[in-house]
Image: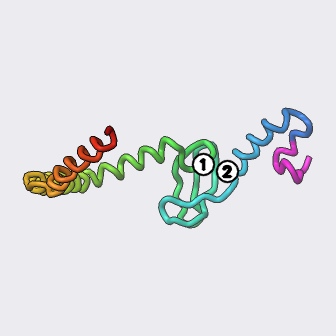
């Protein structure tokens, strides 16, 4: 059987297996058949040779990957953690700078806190007036 309009390559299964299973198979097959970007030359020329084996038609580099894609989720996580360790020294410097800024802000706050706030004096002058108004209302 040939490809169909709705289910494309999975049309070969005919009326067997159901629509949901064929949709999942189609998703995997489209992903494995498309051209992927080469990690070495950055060109979209990587094709799948076998399960987990990929080859770049541009630079002829062969490498292992996932069963259907050149990179897997766990592989991406490992690469991200390796990149983060390279910048660990920069991270410690940044945290030290942040700590210095926090200490400076605390010192500024202590200086401001030691000064006598002016608004309390205004409140004290208003309080007797409020008491007088409340006493007049009671009478």
**Residue 95 placed where, x, y %?**
22, 52
108 or 81: which is nearer to us?
Answer: 108
Q: Residue 83 vs residue 128: left or right?
A: right
What is the quadrant of the C terminus in the image?
A: top left
Instruction: State whether residue 76 is above or below residue 138.
Output: below
Q: Magenta stretch: give its range.
A: 1-12
Which residue is denoted by mark 1 in the rendering? Answer: 69
Mark 1–mark 2 distance (CA, rounded to whole Å): 7 Å
Judge the density around disc 2: few (<14), some (14-19), many (≥20) Cα neighbours within 10 Å.
Answer: few
- Name the spot of residue 46 as percent of width and height, x first: 60, 59
Determine which of the numbered discs, if any, sits on residue 116 in the image.
Answer: none
| Disc 1 to disc 2: CB gap under 8 Å | yes
Which residue is disc 2 drawn over? Answer: 31
Q: Is residue 57 magenta?
A: no
**Does the rendering let one see residue 96?**
no
Q: Nearer the viewer, residue 105 or 125?
A: 125
Q: What colour scheme does the image use?
A: rainbow
Task: Assign a secondary structure to mark 2.
Answer: helix
């Amino acid at each position: 059987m040939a490809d169909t309009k709705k289910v494309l390559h999975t049309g070969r299964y005919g009326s067997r297996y159901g629509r949901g299973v064929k949709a999942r198979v189609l998703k995997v097959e489209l992903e494995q058949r498309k051209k992927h970007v080469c990690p070495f030359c950055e060109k979209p020329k990587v094709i799948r040779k076998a399960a987990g084996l990929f080859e770049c038609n541009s630079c002829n580099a062969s490498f292992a990957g996932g069963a259907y894609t050149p990179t897997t989720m766990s592989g991406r996580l490992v690469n991200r953690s390796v990149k983060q360790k390279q910048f660990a020294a920069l991270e410690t410097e940044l945290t030290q700078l942040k700590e210095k800024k926090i200490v400076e802000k605390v010192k500024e706050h202590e200086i401001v806190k030691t000064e006598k706030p002016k608004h309390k004096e205004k409140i004290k002058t208003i309080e007797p007036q409020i008491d007088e108004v409340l006493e007049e209302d009671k009478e």
